[in-house]
Image (cartoon, rainbow, N blue to C red):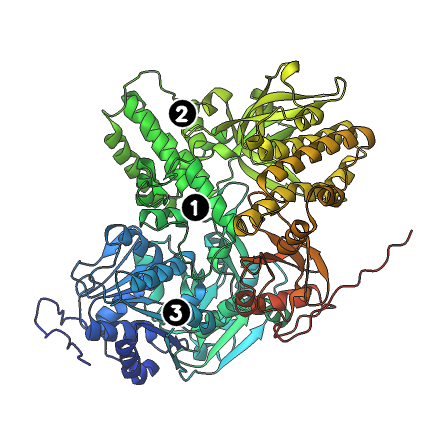
Amino acid sequence: MTVRPPPARGSQEALPTRSLPKVALPIDRWTPDVLEAVRRNSRVLVIASPGSGKTTRLPWAISEAFGKVYVLEPRRIAAKLSAERVAEENGFRIGEEIGYQFRFERRRKDSSRLVFLTEGTLLRELQSNPTLKGISVLVLDEFHERHLQADLALSIAKRLQETTRPDLKIVLMSATLDAGPLERFLPGSEKIEVEAPRFPIEIEYAPRETKLEIEVRRKVSDLLGRPDAEAFGDLLVFLPGMAEIRRAESELRMLRGSFEIHVLHGEVPREAQDRALGRSNQRKVILSTNIAESSVTIPGVNTVIDAGMSRIASFSHTSGLPRLETKSISRASAIQRAGRAGRTAPGRVVRLYSRGDFDGRPVQETPEILRSDLAPVLLDLLSLGYGPDFGFFESPAAERLEAGWELLADLGFMLTQDASDGLPVLSETGKWAAESSFHPRITRALIEAAKFAATDPGKGSDQGTVVSALLAVSEGESLGVDFLEGIGKFRPEGFQSRISDRMRELLDKMTASMRGKTKNTTSGPSGDELISRVILAGFPDRVGRRKGREILLARGGSAETSDEAYWTHSEYHLVLDLQETKRSGELRARTVARSALAVTEEWLWEVEPLPISERTERVFDEKKKIWETWSVLALHDLVLSRTFVAEKSDRVSGDSASNGILPEAEWETLFSAWLSDLKKGLAERDTEISPRVAERTDAEAWTALVIRYRLLRENYSEELTEGVAAEDFASLLRALMKEGYRDARASRGFPELEILLEGLWSAASLRKFKTETPAMISLPGRKRVPVHYEDGGPVRIESRMQEFFSLAEGPKILGGRLKLSLHLLAPNYRAVQMTEDLRGFWERHYPALRKELMRKYPRHSWPENPLTAAPTEERRPMRKN
């Protein structure tokens, strides 16, 4: 192995004026082993305990031995501190041989040999360097945090190794890494575990009894006043966010004593961060978010106060944007925080929650990719040339992937397919979105603003207001029911100002690019209309239609409105924020529209791509005893208008359909529409029958019949020589419609499916149909569960999780050709997991869920190893009359 020596002192690369002495760290004696592993293997996992020195020592050693190295860090401050520490230890000026880069800050050169990046920055760099040309080793640090962009970076790096970059090496580092799933995803990987000697840590549980900021003041006062306070050095206080930090800071300033208060947060100026991280002659109390969980050692800190909470990235289904929610941290994060106290001397940790609370928390955080909006990720993948077949380290649920792809298409960022290879590709506006660092919805709104500004130069003065409005939407600011009225009071502060500047830069750039390409006009919107139409372009699926005190929503469902007169001004509103609330005594939560802006139907028709679709509906007229055909214009599930289109002589009933008026090619489509309308008509004309109709398994079987037959025909086309030919299927549908129409009118029920099948198909064909696409299937505990065949979704079964115990693989149909999607239910019969990879669920997710399920449902069985446990079937108590 050739190890490149560091540059000579006095060369242009070296800076002899400042160099930290290299203190021996536990990782040092393991460094040769790690380098040897990287030499012989392209995939290496390094598990090293906190304080071992892996972040500052290993990347530089790898760089000296193998060439240029990129190190991905989960947070900006970790990237910056790590780069600065490595540069100082090796006598370099930061930004030369060793550098860092993240949003809004870059201190590196193209020639830098070691670069620390945030995970999102790497994805931006891949746009211009999709094969990571020139990069020898990619190091993913603190991978246990499972940030979405880190998962994506790992998956892309693996794909590169398997295609264009077999020479690329991947090194994953963490203190609390679950190596099992990674070893399966990265076959042949080599694992090195380093256990650094730790100083003893004293852990105290002190559940808070009052407001968080007051509890922090009390604990800080108590700790600073203890006789052994000096021995435990500076205090590091973990709080959820900036609001809590500022309140705690205000409380601490009431205390008397010789200590300094510092704030460690991404929003504070660099100089303030340097003071928080540097040494001082006085004791320090550092108030920080989780950015201090994983980074280089903070000098002097031997005491930690942990509030046990953090801002967790998630997805708001009500706003359609990412959100940060305040939630309890996992045990892994709590252990990581505690590790900050015992790196250089004995430490003390005070947790502001109970030991029982700690024991009941999940072992690890749920990976971000399983709880976040996927549209930005899919946009990144498209921009890099990847498609729907991309191999994720841990694949999200199919319905969430589908929702992400659908949003990109709705925003006009994705062309259906590329003629060359059949894969979806980015549109021109999609390319703008891929280069942007903002959410696709916000970028689409900025594109709309740029179009208006480019075609009407006089509207340039409105762009500042547009940016403020989009920033408020992006940041989830609560501006009251009337968003347009509230925006006038919104003023960006701190980090928001930098985001606002970036938005304005992108808007100006897009406007300049569009000028001259679009016909000029002087009649473009301005003021409130401009803001409304710009936001509408990014959120067309958030439109609602007022109906009394209710807003009917485009994506289904409804929301209540307040008593304010604002809602009476317009029929249509763009609902920006919804909140679920429950009054005292109410059993169900209500959805309330908290913030909105008025829009018009005319504006909806001008959104590109057009979000409005046209469909045909057949409605049963009870008085005329006939089916009528209507043309419906709708925005997703929100009906805008209905128009009667069919004359009486053209109407189709069950009787006329059975006589062959329509071509056979249209039977499947007609049957699906007819069945939907029949059930709807029954429900509307008789409220007593509607629940019964919805629950009738034979009606569901009718719908599933089309899907079951299609699956059978696609997989056994050569074997189906009798009974189940296409013309017989059309006959079956005609019979179903005729009998269904007649029985529904007479008895408000449905004919038995099995009787009709037996009358039309041969015994052999019927047996094939029942065995290869079964209506029921058995689980290990001998329980039979229905198989759900639904249009547009996977074939699935659902049952309580305990009934899948002992299974490493779920049931299959079609002679083992098709895996069933498994919906694993909790004892409350709500889905805990949807998966086709049962073994992967048991190994990767079940251990973390087990503790929470044991706490919620202690009377149920939750074995450590579900693969060896016997399945249990619930015995429900009989209902009393």
- Foreground: 732 or 644? 732
Amino acid carrying label 2: it is Leu
Instruction: Indicate whether 535 appears above or below 360.
Output: above
In the image as oriented, which residue stretches furthest toward the front?
721
The mark lying in front, picked from 2 and 3, is 3
Q: Can residue 347 be seen in this view?
A: yes
Pointers 2 and 3 in contact (C-beta within 8 Å): no
Relative to 362, is 132 on the left or the right? left
Q: Measuring 33% from the left and 37% from the top, which residue is drawn there?
A: 427
Pointers 1 and 3 in contact (C-beta within 8 Å): no
**What x and y, as percent, mark residue 80?**
30, 62
Instruction: Indicate whether 12 appears above or below 596.
Output: below
| Label 1, label 3: how far apart the Cα atoms are | 26 Å
How many residues crowd around disc 2 within 10 Å: few (fewer than 14), some, or many (20 or more)?
Answer: many
**What x and y, as percent, mark residue 516?**
22, 24
How many residues crowd around disc 3 within 10 Å: few (fewer than 14), some, or many (20 or more)?
Answer: some
**What x and y, as percent, mark residue 756?**
73, 41
Amino acid carrying label 3: it is Leu
Counting residues from the start of the chain, the first of labels 2 and 3 encountered is: 3
- Foreground: 24 or 663? 663
Amino acid carrying label 1: it is Ala
Check disc 1 and report the residue beneath it.
Answer: 375
The mark lying in front, picked from 1 and 3, is 3
Q: Which quadrant would residue 666 be assigned to in this image?
A: top right
Instruction: Indicate whether 88 appears above or below 434.
Output: below
Task: Give the secondary structure at mark 3.
Answer: loop
**What x and y, as percent, mark residue 192?**
37, 80
Using the image, tell me which numbered label, if any, was put on residue 530.
Answer: 2
Check disc 3 and report the residue beneath it.
Answer: 186
Q: Which quadrant would residue 16 be assigned to in this image?
A: bottom left
| Label 2, label 1: how far apart the Cα atoms are | 26 Å
Instruction: Indicate whether 733 appears above or below 525.
Output: below
